[in-house]
Image: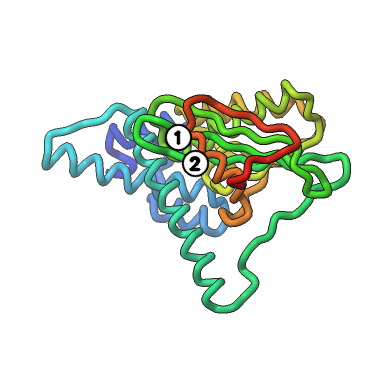
Amino acid sequence: MFKSCVVAQDVWNYLGWHWLSGDASPLTEQICSEFRRKKQEHLEVLLWGCWALWNERNLRVWEGKSSSLQQFTTRARAFVEGWKQVNERAIEGRSKQDGRSGIAVWSSPKEGVWKLNVDAAVRKNICGFGWCVRDHGGGFLAGAASKWPGSLTPLMAKLASIREALGWLKEVGGTSVVLESDSMGAISEILDGSSSSAAGLLRDDINNLAKSFTHIPFSHIRRSTNKPAHLLARAACSLSDSQFWHYSHPSFI
């Protein structure tokens, strides 16, 4: 059902994976091939796509419900993003228990380069975006807690916060920046994503904004390293309006 089913073929085509829907080789063979090639982003799409197809099949058979392609892929991506965050926290917790130096520490950028840490918090019918800019000496340059009305999946919220942060940084004149996020899903989507879904539209916006900077690598970091941005994002959900700070950071971070 994961390849010959018409719905499955529509899903793979919707995600831009035309080669998968048209490939006659067994799905298990393709999964093994992705393992050998170490294409993590391809393997993730295969696995969450198969999980979502099976879940959709059960909904249709047992409850008579069906979803649009966009609803289908959004729900599946949200599941994977949540799984990644839980898995990352579990790995970090094991490192602490084993006594290893598994706690990542914020590292300063090179002189003349800013470091932009970004995060998002998702609440019922509202999202909070937070970002923090520091220089090579660790000095606080600017920060923001931006409120976003409406409901987004964790992945969409993380991507939207990155887009908003880059748009803001472009306006204030940043040129050479290192961007960090604790969302592996968002960073993977920006660097290697090929979907044509709503996440793909945000990815394209981000990559277009990135062209405004002379230097802007995107990096995935641990949640513990991204704490200031996380606190700003969480605070944004309870603010009456967006707030911005320059050179003097708020007391709660």
Residue 49 badge: none
Residue in the picture at 39% in, 37% down: 123
Q: Residue 193 lies in what quarter of the image?
A: top right
- Tell me residue 133's x, y (percent): 71, 39
Give the residue drawn at x 83%, y 47%.
136
Label at residue 238: 1
What x and y, as percent, mark residue 152? 41, 32
Residue found at x 56% / y 40%: 232
Please identify, in this view, whether the residue under mark 1 or under mark 2 is nearer the observer: 1
Mark 1 is on which residue type?
Answer: Ser
Query: Neighbour class for label 1 at 10 Å: few (<14), some, many (≥20)?
Result: some
**Helix, strand or loop for disc 2:** helix
Instruction: Give the residue drawn at x 78%, y 49%.
Output: 138
Which residue of the protein is positioned furthest toward the right in this rendering? 111
Q: Which residue is outermost to the front?
A: 251
Q: Is residue 179 left or right of residue 85?
A: right
The colour scheme of the drawn protein is rainbow
Left or right: residue 108 versus residue 147 is right
Query: Can residue 213 be seen at all in this image of the molecule?
Result: yes
Question: Does the CB distance between marks 1 and 2 fall below 8 Å?
Answer: yes
Residue 212 rendering spot, x and y as whole percentages:
75, 24
Q: Nearer the viewer, residue 227 or 87?
A: 227
Label 1 sits on a secondary structure element that is: loop
In the displayed image of the protein, which residue is found farthest to the bottom?
98
Q: Which mark is residue 234?
A: 2
> Is residue 9 visible in this depiction of the protein?
no
Of residues 248 and 47, which is closer to you in this image? 248
Q: Nearer the viewer, residue 203 or 69?
A: 203
Q: Is residue 115 left or right of residue 90?
A: right
Taking 43 as reference, is 21 left or right? Answer: left
Q: Amino acid at mark 2?
A: Arg
